[in-house]
Amino acid sequence: MRQRGIEQRGMVTAELAVGLLVAALALFGASSVIGLLILQDRAETIAVQAARHAARGDAQQLQRVKQVAPSNSTIDVSTRDGWVHVTVTATRSWGPIGPVEVSATAQQPLEPGQ
C-alpha cells in the first residue's frame, strides 16, 4: 500500500514538471509575439512621422525621428511624383530561430513649395 502512494507522487511530480515547462514555453512565445507587435507599431509610427516631416521639408525634425527609431532599423526616404515614400525596416533576433524582420511604409504628398 505504501509503495503505490510513492509511485503516484512521482507521477504527479513528472506531470507538474512537464506542465510547467509547457507553460513557460507558451509564455515565452506569447511575449515574443507581443514584442513583435510592439515593434511593428513603433515602425509604423516612425514611418508616418518621417513621411510627414519629409513632406514639410523639416530636415531637423526628420533627423529627430530617425534618432528615436528602434535599434537595428533602417529608414528609407524617397520622393517621386510629388509624394514622399518612407519605409522603416526593423530586425529582431530570436536566437537560434534567427532574425525576424518587420517593416512599415507611409506616404505623404509634398507640401506646396517643397
Image (cartoon, rainbow, N blue to C red):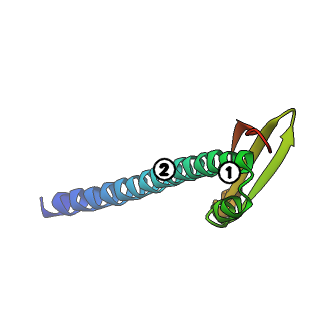
The residue to which callout 1 is attached is 53
Circle 2 crowding by C-alpha within 10 Å: few under 14, some 14–19, many from 20: few
- Image quarter where the C terminus lies is top right
Mark 2 and mark 1 lie on one chain; the one further toward the N terminus is 2
* Position above or below: 15 against 55: below
Please give the label number shown on residue 94: none
Farthest-out residue, front? 113
* Position above or below: 80 against 8: above
Residue 84: quarter of image = top right
Q: Position of residue 79 (x, y in %)?
A: 85, 42
Q: Nearer the viewer, residue 110 or 89?
A: 110
Farthest-out residue, right? 80
**Kind of element beneath mark 1:** helix
Q: Amino acid at mark 1?
A: His
Left or right position of 37 against 104:
left
Q: Position of residue 113 (x, y in %)?
A: 79, 43
Tell me what residue is drawn at x 75 percent, y 52 percent: 57
**Kind of element beneath mark 2:** helix
Tell me what residue is drawn at x 62 percent, y 49 percent: 49
Left or right position of 87 against 15:
right
The residue to which callout 2 is attached is 34
Q: Position of residue 82 (x, y in %)?
A: 83, 34
